[in-house]
């Protein structure tokens, strides 16, 4: 990208680093969902309700502490976890409701 004023390769190097971080982040999200699928199978096996509000609170509190310790906007992490939790609840609901799921 000649002429972008960002220096010779510095920007591209940083973007490549960012791309690697993004790939790791996506892989971790996939692994988190897979773990939630395993949890859903256990919940189904033992008749445990899918929704566990206390557990959601624990996860959100841990994210809020992390935000405070690392200078990240806690509102951002709350919104991010709201999305992640909503998706994992959707997936768990599918698994718990359908013995042939995932």
Image: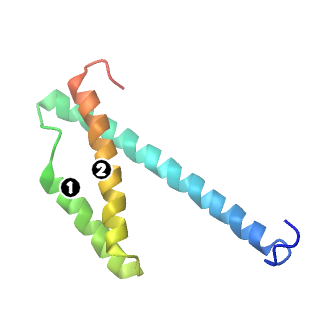
Q: Is residue 50 above or below residue 52?
A: above
Image position of 24 (left or right of 2) = left
Q: Quadrant of residue 70?
A: bottom left
Determine whether the residue tagged by mark 1 lies in a helix, strand or loop: helix
Query: Which residue position holds label 2?
Result: 85
> Would residue 38 be visible to someone looking at this image?
no
Front-most of 70 and 39?
70
Image position of 44 (left or right of 13) = left
Quarter that holds the C terminus: top left
- Image coordinates of residue 21 in percent, x first then y, are 59, 60
Circles 1, 2 touching at the beta carbon (< 8 Å): yes
Determine whether the residue tagged by mark 2 lies in a helix, strand or loop: helix
**Residue under the image location 29 percent in, 75 percent down:** 65
**Residue under the image location 71 percent in, 62 percent down:** 16
| Pointer 1 or 2: first along the chain | 1
**Residue under the image location 17 percent in, 38 percent down:** 50
- Image coordinates of residue 11 in percent, x first then y, are 75, 72
- Image coordinates of residue 101 in percent, x first then y, are 32, 23
Query: Furthest-right residue in view?
Result: 2
Q: Residues within 10 Å of mark 1 (few under 14, many from 20)?
A: some
Q: Quadrant of residue 80?
A: bottom left
Query: Which residue position holds label 1?
Result: 56
Q: Which mark is residue 26?
A: none
Query: Furthest-top residue in view?
Result: 100
Quarter that holds the N terminus: bottom right
Is the image coloured rainbow, by chain, by secondary structure, or in one colour? rainbow
- Image coordinates of residue 10 in percent, x first then y, are 78, 74
> Would residue 28 be visible to someone looking at this image?
yes
């Amino acid at each position: 990208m000649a002429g972008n004023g960002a220096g010779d390769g510095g920007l591209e190097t940083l973007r490549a680093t960012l791309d690697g971080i993004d790939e790791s982040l996506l892989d971790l999200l996939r692994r988190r969902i897979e773990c939630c699928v395993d949890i859903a199978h256990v919940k189904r096996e033992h008749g445990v309700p899918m929704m566990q509000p206390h557990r959601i609170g624990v996860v959100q509190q841990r994210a809020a502490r992390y935000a405070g310790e690392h200078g990240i906007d806690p509102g951002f992490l709350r919104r991010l976890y709201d999305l992640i939790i909503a998706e994992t609840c959707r997936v768990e609901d599918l698994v718990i409701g359908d013995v042939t799921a995932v």
